[in-house]
Image (spheres, rainbow, N blue to C red):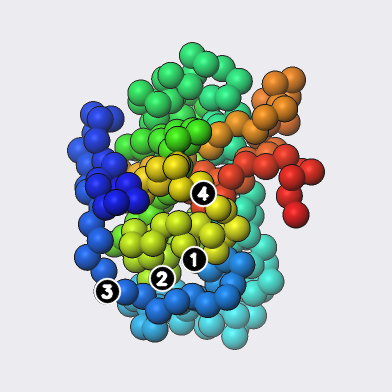
Amino acid sequence: MTDDGKTALEGSGFPKKAVTSTFAAAEPIGAQSRIDEHDHQDVPSDPALRVKALESLLVEKGLVDPAALDVLVDTYENKIGPRNGARVVARAWADPAYKVRLLADAASAIAELGYTSGQGEHMVVVENGSTVHNLVVCTLCSCYPWPVLGLPPVWYKSAQYRSRAVIDPRGVLAEFGTYIDEEVEVRVWDSTAELRYIVLPERPAGTDDFSEERLAALVTRDAMIGVSKVLLPEEKS
């Protein structure tokens, strides 16, 4: 969806689910540098309640170490999963022919690097550029390209992000510290169980001599969702 409410879901050859701005206005998130990663919906879903109850029981009986669970979740959320996506992005930056294949048929191109799973049969890669910035959301729940991004972060599943990313994308981006010039179009893409999106960020200037490994080290999970840009270490505050 563009800033003026027009759908951006067109032209890739896949069935698209148009984003609509039919949400009630959400309460302001407040003066935060980013959306609170510990924000939860008031009433967890039944599966969430069952998982929490099972976790509590296992911890109580000494069968599970909570710290070990936290490490495991962090590994899949921030390391293993996003590292796969970072390698995909780095390959696209370094290999123009691969980039063409990635934009034309993301799932097949990603599978070339060995990343496949039941949560990524149908993926579309949308490319950021000097005139367009893309942002990914799942307005219904938390559909997410697991093979390349791992587990979705808590804020991605929150009601605030899921509604406000559609009705106020620039405001949400600003809360992540990402400020988009007015002349740049912001497009919002709605992931579903059938079709999941990943952002191909802009390659930072001054990286022409970087190896793929060095390029991949720059790419973050948030940049592949679209809430941040890829920065060089010296550009990060």
Q: Mark 3 points at which residue?
A: 24
Q: Which of 88 and 233 is in front in this view?
A: 233
Please report the residue visible at 22 percent of the width from the left and 42 percent of the height from the top: 16
Secondary structure of residue under mark 3: loop
Q: Are marks 1 and 2 in contact (CB under 8 Å)?
A: yes
Estimate the x, y position of residue 217 in percent, counting from the top left.
Answer: 70, 38
Earlier in the chain: of badge 4 and badge 1, it is 1
In this figure, what is the number of numbered marks?
4
What is the distance, in whole Å, between disc 4 and disc 1 at their CAs? Answer: 21 Å
What is the distance, in whole Å, between disc 2 and disc 4 at their CAs? Answer: 20 Å
Give the number of the disc on residue 155.
1
Q: Mark 4 points at which residue?
A: 180
10 Å crowding of disc 4: few (<14), some (14-19), many (20+): some
Q: Quadrant of residue 143?
A: bottom left
- Find the residue positioned furthest to the front: 183
Please report the residue visible at 57 percent of the width from the left and 53 percent of the height from the top: 178
Give the number of the disc on residue 160.
2
10 Å crowding of disc 3: few (<14), some (14-19), many (20+): few
Q: Which of 185 and 46 is in front in this view?
A: 185
